[in-house]
Amino acid sequence: MPPRLLKLPPRLPTTHISSSRLTLRLSPKPRHLAPAPRLCPRSLAISYHSSSKLLSTSTSTTAGNVPTYAIPTSGLLARLPRSWVPYAELIRLDKPAGSYYLFFPCLWSTLLAAPVASSPPGAVLSTSFLFLAGAVIMRGAGCTINDLWDRNLDPHVARTRLRPIARGAVAPLSALVFTGAQLLTGLAVLLQFPFECFWYATPSLLLVASYPLAKRVTYYPQAVLGLTFSWGAIMGFPALGVDLLSNGAALAGAGLLYASNVAWTVLYDMIYAHMDIKDDAKAGIKSIALKHDKETKQVLTGLAAVQIALLAGAGVATGAGPAFFIGSCGGAALTLGVMIKRVNLKNVKDCWWWFVNGCWITGGAVSLGLAADYLLRYTQEAPEKDLKDDEESA
């Protein structure tokens, strides 16, 4: 018996696309296959399961490999419930450098005001911890507001395209509600301070909301960021009971410290902006790094000089001693000089390293000088105060 022949289906017609370097054979897609998903700008495709939890993301581009999102498997975020992870990423919980940059002006202001207020170490420590909690909360709120503003820009920048709102893991309405919750929590922390602090802190909310808009209208959004992040340089004085409106020396010290912090913020954020300089140019986002790309180190040097001069002025106004000028001003000059000389502005990883570690190197030096000056002055004033109290009681 002859073997049975297997009848094959008719061959599908093919289409040839030829060029001098490439030949493609395209066959029509069988109808039973689902159509390929459409890709969003920058070809970012996001997959969800039925309960809307993020499972995976994939990217495709003809320009080369694009980073893909992966659910954290280590660190703090890996210990959180899966549904919390996008919100933790939204407030940059895994990248706390921004919170520390927001906290340092508060700490410096507290240490500078402590000798003026004759505050004991316990009061200085408790006030500093409250400021740290407030910095973490308000920095998170600021990041959420920033990502809401930038939800249509972030997909076009390599470093930000996988942020929670940009990749669709958090809906804008959910982010808005989350922002409200953070602001209410920040208000609860603020109310732990003397009530006068409420009136000093409230204007900063306008700056928090306006910074993302500045990137669209000026090449100097870092100046607006400086005004925002430096607000804590004022807050230490009323937090320790010093009335700035009736104490001229304290007002001058707070104002000079605030201006010094503005210069410092513009300095470190200019280094930070160099990480996105190519993508910012393509996306139409303005920054000081784009405006002064060819003379960045000269601008950084000028900002460092301004920061140190204003910091020294704040010390003079509040009667600071040698420990402050040597430790804080000298430490800032040394650490900033090393950073400006060594940072490679064309290397993204090097810019990020100096942004993260410069926070602790320069911020730590200034803090140590202020703390040493406060403790020296406090130990000198304590016996004199006790003697005066004894004489009054006698």
Image (cartoon, helix red, strand yellow):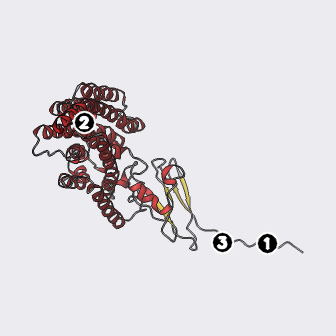
Whole-percent x and y of residue 110?
Answer: 25, 41
Q: Secondary structure at mark 2?
A: loop
Identify the image quadrant of the N terminus. Answer: bottom right
User: Circle 2: is it few (<14), some (14-19), or many (20+) Cα within 10 Å?
Assistant: some
Left or right position of 246 against 141: left
Q: Which residue corresponds to mark 3?
A: 10
Q: Nearer the viewer, mark 2 or mark 3?
A: 2
Q: Secondary structure at mark 3?
A: loop
Identify the image quadrant of the C terminus. Answer: top left
Front-most of 320 and 104? 320
Q: Which residue corresponds to mark 2?
A: 292
Q: Quadrant of residue 384?
A: top left
Q: Amino acid at mark 1?
A: Leu
Which dot marks residue 5?
1
For the question of whether residue 281 can be seen, the reply is no
Q: How many marks?
A: 3
Marks 2 and 3, how far apart in space?
A: 65 Å
Whole-percent x and y of residue 149?
Answer: 29, 58
